[in-house]
Image: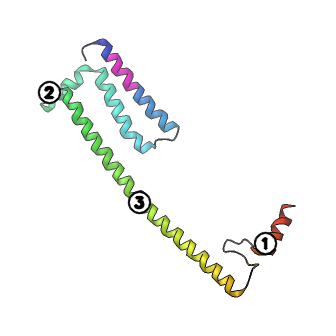
């Protein structure tokens, strides 16, 4: 960036990006493990903004003729890493969701079996699986406890 105003704009945008990421982490909207990659991006942007020769040095080191094209390559690599990370997270959440759905189904079945057993016995004032008293006696006990 040959012009000083462009350099200042780039520095301001980089600092704004870092501030945004830190604020999202502070508010709990972005987890720390996810924020690490985003912070790394902000630091890289800030480094390229502060040190104009860094991008040219990197281009010469790799053998790239047009230095700004390195930014596109880095951006593509960053996007692939984020996609992989998100894919891993989605797979883990799908597994957890499936396990939770199975647990809920088992609990619903247990409650249904418990209710059938109580109906077959003709009991109306029985304790539920969690220890709560149901029926007329349970309502009376709840009313007395509230007094």
Say which label, 3 or 1, has the lower sequence index.
Answer: 3
Residue 56 in the image, given as x and y percentages of width and height: 19, 24
Crowding at dot 1, Cα within 10 Å, few <14 / some 14-19 / many 20+, comes out as: some
Q: Residue at x 23, y 24 (%)?
A: 54
Residue 95 in the image, given as x and y percentages of width and height: 41, 62
Which one is closest to the eye, mark 2 or mark 1?
1
Provide the residue span drawn in magenta: 7-15
For disc 1, the marked residue is: 138
Given the current orientation, which residue lies at the most extreme right position? 147
* Residue 90 forms part of the magenta stretch: no
Name above or below for residue 10 compared with residue 108. Answer: above
Distance in Å between CA atoms under marks 3 and 1: 40 Å
Crowding at dot 2, Cα within 10 Å, few <14 / some 14-19 / many 20+, comes out as: few
Among the 4 quarters of the image, the one containing residue 14 = top left
Q: Which of the numbered marks, if any, corresponds to residue 60? A: 2
Among the 4 quarters of the image, the one containing residue 121 = bottom right
Q: Residue at x 25, y 20 (%)?
A: 52
Q: Which of the numbered marks, if any, corresponds to residue 94? A: 3
Name above or below for residue 8 compared with residue 20. Answer: above
Name above or below for residue 32 compared with residue 125. Answer: above
């Amino acid at each position: 960036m040959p012009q000083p105003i462009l350099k200042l704009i780039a520095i301001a945008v980089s600092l704004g990006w870092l501030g945004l990421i830190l604020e999202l982490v502070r508010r709990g909207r972005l987890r720390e493990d996810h924020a690490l990659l985003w912070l790394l991006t902000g630091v890289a942007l800030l480094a390229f903004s502060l040190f104009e020769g860094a991008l040219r040095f990197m281009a010469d080191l790799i053998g790239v003729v047009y230095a700004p094209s390195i930014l596109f390559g880095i951006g593509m690599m960053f996007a692939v890493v984020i996609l992989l990370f998100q894919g891993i997270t989605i797979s883990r959440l799908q597994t957890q969701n499936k396990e939770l759905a199975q647990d809920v189904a088992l609990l619903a079945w247990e409650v249904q079996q418990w209710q059938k057993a109580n109906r077959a016995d003709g009991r109306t004032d029985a304790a539920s699986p969690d220890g709560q008293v149901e029926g007329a006696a349970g309502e009376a006990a709840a009313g007395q406890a509230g007094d």
